[in-house]
Image (spheres, rainbow, N blue to C red):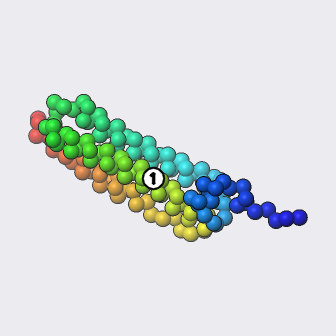
Amino acid sequence: MAEYDEDDDRGALAKRVLPGGKEPDPRFTLANERTFLAWIRTSLAFLAGGIALEAFAAREFPAQLRTGISVFLIIIGMLISAGAALRWRRIELSMRHGKPLPLPLIVPILGLGGAIVAAIVAVLIATKL
């Protein structure tokens, strides 16, 4: 009787994106996927915030500043989205190879970016009062 090779069941894309290692417990893989989706929701919130600021705050902020903050929010959203995909893969590879989980590099991007935008908007609102 031939030995079962779990790698035979994996598709070509899975073999390319996640080469080698041992298939992790499905619960951990699904938890990693849920975390990825949470980061994607956060990314979409930043994108929507940037678009909404540009579209609906025309009378509240000077045009150049409003556009600058909007672009900054959209760029943060793009970075979080890309970071979420990279993080998902790094964690999946770590689990497959029995290595420690990597630190989340997108957390500083989210924290710092959100703090900068919030500070700018707070100052602008406070100066209008």
Q: What percent of the width, then of the height, locates residue 100?
A: 53, 68
Camera sees residue 57: yes
Residue 16's place in the image compared with 116, above or below, is below
In the depicted view, which residue is nearer to us: 50 or 34?
50
For the residue carrying disc 1, how many other residues have a C-alpha within 10 Å: few (<14), some (14-19), or many (20+)? many
117 to the left or right of 18: left
Q: Residue furthest front?
A: 12
In the depicted view, which residue is nearer to us: 105 or 65?
65
Residue for point 66% across, 64% down = 22
Residue for point 27% across, 50% down = 115
Label count reads 1
In what element is the residue under mark 1? helix
Q: What percent of the width, then of the height, locates residue 71?
A: 26, 44
Residue 127: name its quadrant. top left
Q: Which residue is mark 1?
A: 84
Q: Residue furthest right?
A: 1
Q: Quadrant of the C terminus?
A: top left
40 to the left or right of 57: right
Residue 60's place in the image compared with 93, above or below, is above
Residue for point 21% across, 32% down = 57
